[in-house]
Image (tube, coloured by chain):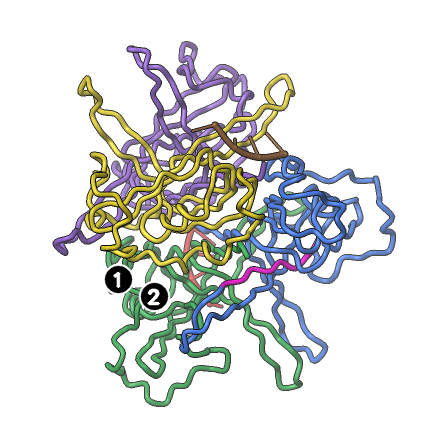
Chain colours: A yellow, B purple, C green, D blue, E red, F brown
Amino acid sequence: MASINKVILIGNLGKDPEVRHLEGGVAVARFPLATSETFKDKNGERQERTEWHNIVVWRGLAEVAEKYVKKGQSVYIEGRIRTNSYQDKEGVQRYSTEIVADNMTMLGGRPEGGAVAGAGNYGNEASSASVSNTSAGSGQSKGNPSNKPVAYEEEPDDLPF
Amino acid sequence: MASINKVILIGNLGKDPEVRHLEGGVAVARFPLATSETFKDKNGERQERTEWHNIVVWRGLAEVAEKYVKKGQSVYIEGRIRTNSYQDKEGVQRYSTEIVADNMTMLGGRPEGGAVAGAGNYGNEASSASVSNTSAGSGQSKGNPSNKPVAYEEEPDDLPF
Amino acid sequence: MASINKVILIGNLGKDPEVRHLEGGVAVARFPLATSETFKDKNGERQERTEWHNIVVWRGLAEVAEKYVKKGQSVYIEGRIRTNSYQDKEGVQRYSTEIVADNMTMLGGRPEGGAVAGAGNYGNEASSASVSNTSAGSGQSKGNPSNKPVAYEEEPDDLPF
Amino acid sequence: MASINKVILIGNLGKDPEVRHLEGGVAVARFPLATSETFKDKNGERQERTEWHNIVVWRGLAEVAEKYVKKGQSVYIEGRIRTNSYQDKEGVQRYSTEIVADNMTMLGGRPEGGAVAGAGNYGNEASSASVSNTSAGSGQSKGNPSNKPVAYEEEPDDLPF
DNA sequence: TTTT
DNA sequence: TTTT
């Protein structure tokens, strides 16, 4: 059936990406991304609300995230919403929502250390669709022998990442 | 800070909208929306995965939803992601993600009863930005004396709906 | 430099797609797509304005367009804006804007003949990213010996279509 | 009829905005915005293509553009495509495409003079939906006695800007 | 030149 | 947990 599931975010990373290399060499990176909006409450006072998004990127984009994207930086994300369900220890069905990104573009922002020079610095490298999403150097294991995907991290070939 | 939080969905309603009228006459409608994607698994078999989105619409759009949108129909939704947090009965912090829609356009689809004639039938009424989002006829209470917003349903003037 | 160029349209085809097969078998389809908006003029009268978009689709999507998409139908298009420049016969620089689609999903609508049954009928076939955008059967020329791409229709491998 | 016409751009201003104040005090700003994409040509060489978009912003956003947005800066634009038609001096029908923005967010970038301090500096002021789009201080004419809207710049109340 |  |  005709279906669209599309998300566009511009926000700042709350932490450095956490990168894992699954069996077969496929990379996955995760990081929290903050978006905030300001509004006036009923007393006319300016308020701010921050939304936290769990971003997941796969393969080539994950390796870009690993190398170039840091806490504090601003990125553009294009992807889709995905809600995973699992059972908590009491056996209750729980849900966890994440954004699977298929495009990520760095916009600059305030990197921490200082190593990353400035806004848009790695724009070309990181940009968007041109970053290959095919398996990222399978075989060239980057020292991740024991990492296992968590329960809801199904085999990458099973799902349309 | 520069921030964008935008969602675009095309999907089908899993149920008729549930509409409530808060104090002051502000309407809120909620309904589940399904999007699905097909992909090949590692055996080359076609698989389908359905994503369920919790849609929330306010004020004028809620009244449009109440009158014209039914289970099975296809709608275009534009909005933003919002994650509410609450404590479950064990005191554990839980999260619930919804899509607050600020544009909703009917695309037709498969209404159930038959009362709704056809695709796009009410398109003009329902369409998008032209639907007023200012308080929907405050005072003209539609018989909802006891309904109280749930905990995370804060006062509408407190939040940028 | 960090750059995004993204268009999302839902509209109706003004004509059947015109399909051409370039040397090498790459297919290109073009069709006009109407979007319309209604608004109140200063006398409070409802007015309608229709926008016409020149849609271009390549390769696999062009073949989907050729087979399944007809005048009158409603489609979802995702793509990017592209403005071609050329000189008119007086040597004046002119511009022509088109939308290069990389995702096209049929939403139904009112096909003419009647052969196309109903809304979303070919949704699965046509849908989105899963439609291959790799060269569409090169070699299997579909009888297009003399068609040459127009001036601004550069070699497909030269441009990121 | 169900119709969507939506554009999302991130790019850099090619010039400072040109602002005009129509009768009634309504402001309009225009500026060219560049987006660029890189791709490999058939020789495997990296090529870049730049797209120029004619951005138009009205009312409150125009005044934000006038005050805070400068050549070289990076902005996020959300709007819709609009193609105006006119007759050239030979009486031939010509078309000119522009993007009417209804959301503009500054992302920083490379302002020229140096007066504008840094990335996202005026983000809060400029941001998005919160910028009023109602008539921008009618009466407080900013010294624009003779400027007349060009032919295709119809009365603002006639069109859904 | 579409659709409502 | 980010940013302004």
Q: What residue did someone put label 2 on? A: C70
Residue A113, given in percent of the width and then of the height, sits at 53, 39
Q: Is residue D118 magenta?
A: no
Residue at the image position 36 percent from the left and 78 percent from the top:
C20
Mark 1 residue element = loop
Q: Position of residue B156 (x, y in %)?
A: 52, 21
Residue A111 location (% of width, % of height):
53, 40
Front-lying residue, A58 or C125? A58
Quarter of the view holding residue C86: bottom right
Magenta range is D30-37
In the drawing, does residue B115 fall left or right of residue D53? left
Label 1 amino acid? Val
Q: Of the numbered discs in the image, which one, if any, rests on residue A63? A: none
- Snapshot quadrant of residue C29: bottom left
Q: Which residue is drawn at the image coordinates 60% and 44% (left, top)? A: D105
Reading the image, the residue beneath label 1 is C116
x, y (%) of residue B118?
33, 46
Q: Quadrant of the N terminus of chain C?
A: bottom right
Above or below, B124 against D44 in this view is above
